[in-house]
Amino acid sequence: MGKRLEENKKVIDLTGKRFGKLVVNSFGGMVTSGKAYVSSWVCHCDCGEIVTKTKNYLKDNNGTERSCGCVGQVFRKKLLWGFGINDVDLPTQKEIRHPSG
């Protein structure tokens, strides 16, 4: 898979650190990310899942909570999909027609 952590002098050890809901268990090897190699880490999620994530995923914080994917699943379950029934006698939205018909 790649070199071991001991052989990678430039890799910062993330073992035991927490990133959102993920706790890093061990080094997962070096993987390609575009034209460069990046370290991957085996992580344990608070929900019980074990996943492998790259250093870039763990360290780059763009405002989302890091997880195995369980956070997004919970969020998607809360969304309403499809059609509902409007039993209100008043109009709730003006009907807009596209110019093409």
Image: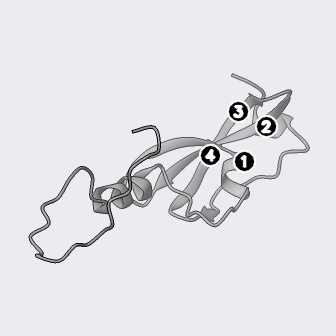
Density class for disc 2 (Cα within 10 Å; few <14, some 14-19, many ≥20) is some
Spatial CA distance of label 4 from label 2 is 15 Å
The disc placed on residue 38 is 2
Density class for disc 1 (Cα within 10 Å; few <14, some 14-19, many ≥20) is some
2 and 1 marks in contact (CB < 8 Å): yes
Spatial CA distance of label 2 from label 1 is 7 Å
Q: Nearer the viewer, mark 2 or mark 3?
A: 2
If you read the primary sequence from the N terminus, does the residue marked by circle 2 or circle 3 appear first?
3
Spatial CA distance of label 1 from label 4 is 12 Å
Q: Is residue 26 above or below residue 32?
A: below
* Residue type at the position of mark 3: Gly
Spatial CA distance of label 3 from label 4 is 9 Å
3 and 4 marks in contact (CB < 8 Å): no
Density class for disc 3 (Cα within 10 Å; few <14, some 14-19, many ≥20) is some
* Residue type at the position of mark 2: Val
Q: Nearer the viewer, residue 81 or 4?
A: 81
Residue at point 36%, 53% (across, down): 73
Q: Nearer the viewer, residue 82 or 89?
A: 89
If you read the primary sequence from the N terminus, does the residue marked by circle 4 or circle 2 appear first?
4
Q: Secondary structure at mark 4?
A: strand
User: Would you name the residue on which mark 1 appears?
Assistant: 55
Spatial CA distance of label 1 from label 3 is 11 Å
Q: Nearer the viewer, mark 4 or mark 2?
A: 2
If you read the primary sequence from the N terminus, does the residue marked by circle 1 or circle 3 appear first?
3
* Residue type at the position of mark 4: Ser
User: Would you name the residue on which mark 4 appears?
Assistant: 26
Q: Secondary structure at mark 3?
A: strand
- The image shows residue 101 at horizontal and vertical percentages of 39, 39
The disc placed on residue 28 is none
Q: Residue furthest top?
A: 1
